[in-house]
Image (cartoon, rainbow, N blue to C red):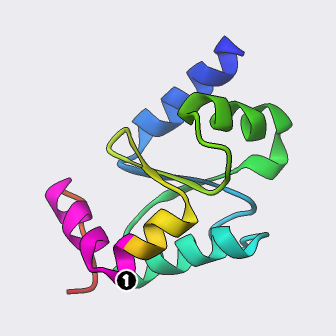
């Protein structure tokens, strides 16, 4: 499991914004992953998608890593932000844009 944790940590460290998701940003394979991709895309956030369906060790490992039972999971600057419901709520309340800006994440939409 430590090799999975090492892999997950290296992925989180490799990009400012990382989304562990079902499917890919171009082809999400679940509605929750699709919603987070749509929100990030709407805001113009550059992010890396990690398809947990390609490797069950990653799929289970990310849940243990974050101590969060569901996917998708969004990480910003190494910090776990949340899953679909949290991201959607932050977006609807206008908090997500502020959070990302405070973290120094470039947004293409003003």
Count every numbered label the image shows and give the total: 1
Q: Residue drawn 57% across and 20% down?
A: 6
Residue 96 sits inside the magenta stretch: yes
Lateral position of residue 67 relative to residue 92, left or right: right
Query: Can you identify the residue that label 1 sits on?
Result: 92
Q: Label 1 neighbourhood size at 10 Å, few (<14), some (14-19), many (20+)?
A: few
Q: Residue drawn 55% across and 73% down?
A: 37
Q: Quadrant of the C terminus?
A: bottom left
Q: Residue drawn 61% across and 22% down?
A: 5
Q: From the viewer's perspective, is residue 58 above or below residue 97? A: above
Q: Residue drawn 79% across and 69% down?
A: 29
Res 44 seen here: no
Counting from the top left corner in percent of width and height, residue 44 is at 36, 77
* Residue 56 placement: quadrant: top right
Lateral position of residue 57 relative to residue 11, left or right: right
Q: In which quarter of the image is the N terminus?
A: top right
Lateral position of residue 66 relative to residue 61, left or right: left
Lateral position of residue 11 relative to residue 96, left or right: right
Q: From the viewer's perspective, is residue 27 above or below residue 101? A: below
Query: Nearest the camera: 92 or 101?
Result: 92
* Residue 68 placement: quadrant: top right
Counting from the top left corner in percent of width and height, residue 108 is at 28, 80
Main SS category, magenta section: helix
Query: Nearest the camera: 90 or 19?
Result: 90
Which region is colored magenta?
90-103
Res 106 seen here: yes
Return the residue found at the far top: 2
Query: Nearest the camera: 39 or 41?
Result: 39
* Residue 34 placement: quadrant: bottom right
Counting from the top left corner in percent of width and height, residue 57 is at 80, 31
Residue 12 sits inside the magenta stretch: no
Counting from the top left corner in percent of width and height, residue 38 is at 53, 80
């Amino acid at each position: 499991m430590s090799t999975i944790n090492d892999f997950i940590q290296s992925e989180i460290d490799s990009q400012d914004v990382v989304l562990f998701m079902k499917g890919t940003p171009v082809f999400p394979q679940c509605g929750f992953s699709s919603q987070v991709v749509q929100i990030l895309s709407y805001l113009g956030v550059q992010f890396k998608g990690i398809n947990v369906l390609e490797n069950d060790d990653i799929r289970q490992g990310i849940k243990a890593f974050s101590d969060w039972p569901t996917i998708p999971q969004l990480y910003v600057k190494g910090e776990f932000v949340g899953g679909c419901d949290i991201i959607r709520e932050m977006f609807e309340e206008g908090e997500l844009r502020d959070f990302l800006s405070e973290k120094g994440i470039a947004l293409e939409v003003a």
